[in-house]
Amino acid sequence: NILYVFLKKSTVTYSWTVEKVNFTDIYEIEVEVNFETEVPAPVVTVQPSFIDINKLVSGEISVVMMNITNHGLIRADDIQISFPSIPCFSVKSNVESYPDSLDAKTSFAYPLIFSRDISC
């Protein structure tokens, strides 16, 4: 018999701070990513970790390339990308599909399109 065993290990941690700004409905969120590389596990990170969309004016569009990288030594399976719900903004992509797995030491770019609603 063959038994495949994976040890549970936390190789990526995310922490963030939210800074209150003196203007109504403006927040700055910065995500700090700490991760180990060269480990026998998938270690997936997303860059950039900070996107300032508050500078978009009504109706304006901004395209940001997200780089999704597996720094680990094992393929990352079941990759899923979801878009957050942000009041007065829409987030989407013009790419209809992306890989469902990410081999070790590889990455791919994924464009995100942010726009500010005209009504806001």
Image (tube, rainbow, N blue to C red):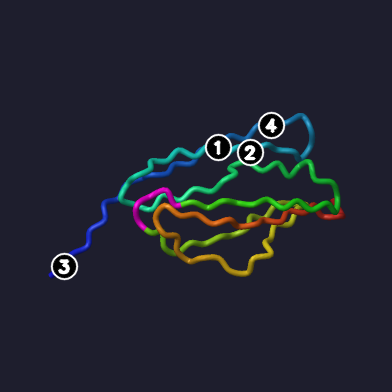
User: Which residue in the structure is indicated by mark 3?
Assistant: 2
Which label number is shown at residue 29?
Answer: 2
In space, the residues marked 1 and 4 are separated at their CA atoms by 13 Å
Within 10 Å of disc 2 (Cα), the crowding (few <14, some 14-19, many 20+) is: some
Residues at badges 4 and 3 in contact (C-beta under 8 Å)? no
Residues at badges 3 and 1 in contact (C-beta under 8 Å)? no
Q: Examine the structure image and report whether residue 71 is included in the region drawn in magenta.
A: yes
In space, the residues marked 4 and 3 are separated at their CA atoms by 54 Å
Residues at badges 1 and 2 in contact (C-beta under 8 Å)? yes
Horizontal side, residue 111 vs residue 120: left or right: left
Horizontal side, residue 50 vs residue 71: left or right: right
Residue placed most toward the observer, 79 or 15: 79
User: Where does the image place residue 23, in percent across and percent down from the top left?
Assistant: 79, 33
Type of the residue with mark 4: Lys
User: Where does the image place residue 70, in percent across and percent down from the top left?
Assistant: 44, 52
Quick one: label 4 or label 2, which is nearer the N terminus? 4
The stretch of residues the image draws in magenta is 70-74
User: Where does the image place residue 67, in percent across and percent down from the top left?
Assistant: 56, 51
In space, the residues marked 3 and 1 are separated at their CA atoms by 42 Å
Give the residue drawn at x 42%, y 41%.
35
User: Where does the image place residue 18, in percent across and percent down from the top left?
Assistant: 62, 35
Circle 1 SS class: strand
Type of the residue with mark 3: Ile
Residues at badges 4 and 2 in contact (C-beta under 8 Å)? no
User: Which residue in the structure is indicated by mark 4?
Assistant: 20
In space, the residues marked 4 and 2 are separated at their CA atoms by 10 Å
